[in-house]
Amino acid sequence: MKKILLYITIIAINLVVADRIFYYFFTNYVFAKTLSGDTGGAINYSLQKKENVDCIILGSSRAKYLIDPALLTAVCDGKGYNAGKSGFGGIVYNNMLLHLIVNKSTAPQMIILQVDPNYYFKWGVEDFTNELLPLYPFINNSKELRNFISTNSNYAEKFKLFFHLYRYNGKFAGVLFNYFKRKSFKPNNGFESLTGRIDTTTFNITEPPKKEFTYSTVKINLLADFVSTCNTLHIKLVVVFPPTYKNTYFVKQASDTITRLLNKDRAVTIFDFSDIQKNPALQSADLWKDDSHLNNTGAVIFSKLLNDSISLKLKP
């Protein structure tokens, strides 16, 4: 029995040592040099190459595909960076990314945060793993990220994270792919445009929104922390509520609630485009890729509308 326990102990130690060694070399000699892709390269690019950008856009795909920094001439001369994340980009992800940004570099002068108020609803048991997965490779760079994972992850996830290579689980192929094409990588402002047009023949809103909602305490607290961090570091915070086609996901109660919470701090400036009925320039189906995303033509119009709004409200 003692021999068996000894063998198990030796195997366990070897596994941990191999895990740490491979993780060290992969992180420092492969991942750190990867500057593109959704497996962490794009985050590397924003932290390594955009550390001195004065204006950063944070949000989901509805920031990444809707807001072109080059058209925001009213702020930072159109030289901002769009760090929106397709597929994720909720307040959990963005609050942790904000801490990575300010811990790594000089704080930007302005942050534009894209917000979808209805995403602050609580639906059953909350699991933030998917929001955190893209940030796992950066756990060592942020105590806020480590603390949030420790507080909000189950024991199984914490056990997996004991092995450092798990931080790249599902990411190895993507990281390697973008590592090998790093020499052909071109500098960019993070914005990506979409082509195509929504198929209105199959589009319909099947169910009216509920009248009463429960809001996520965790998400509300993270939003408050986001605001507090910006205030502490004297970062001008602009919050944008983008529209959806035919108000697919528009819930007035949610917009009003999040607006009310943000308005508690006068340092936050809100631009609410969430009700498409108030924005006739964006109502045509020809401007939409799908019900959540404007296409390239629509993004130009939306970016210019946002720029004009910022110019009117924030310029002296």
Image: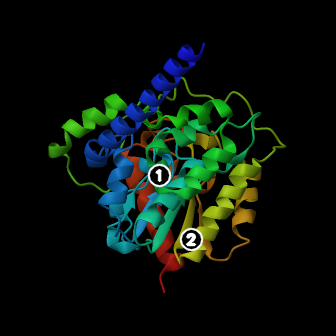
Residue at far right of view:
212
Instruction: Return the residue nearer the eye: 306 or 86.
Output: 86
Disc ID at residue 264: none
The residue that appears at 32% across and 67% down in the rendered structure is: 79
Q: Position of residue 45 (x, y in %)?
A: 32, 53
Instruction: Return the residue nearer the eye: 133 or 186.
Output: 133
- Cβ atoms under marks 2 and 1 closer than 8 Å: no
Q: Position of residue 126 (x, y in %)?
A: 71, 37
Q: Which residue is mark 2?
A: 230
Q: Which residue is mark 1?
A: 140
Question: Can residue 33 be seen in this snapshot?
Answer: yes
Residue at far left of view:
183
The amino acid type of the residue labelled 2 equals Cys
Question: Can residue 195 be seen in this snapshot?
Answer: no
Which is in the foreground here, disc 2 or disc 1?
1
Instruction: Return the residue nearer the eye: 93 or 291.
Output: 93
The amino acid type of the residue labelled 1 equals Asn
Q: Position of residue 272 (x, y in %)?
A: 61, 60
**Element class at badge 2:** helix
The residue that appears at 65% across and 63% down in the rendered structure is: 225
Residue at far front of view:
2
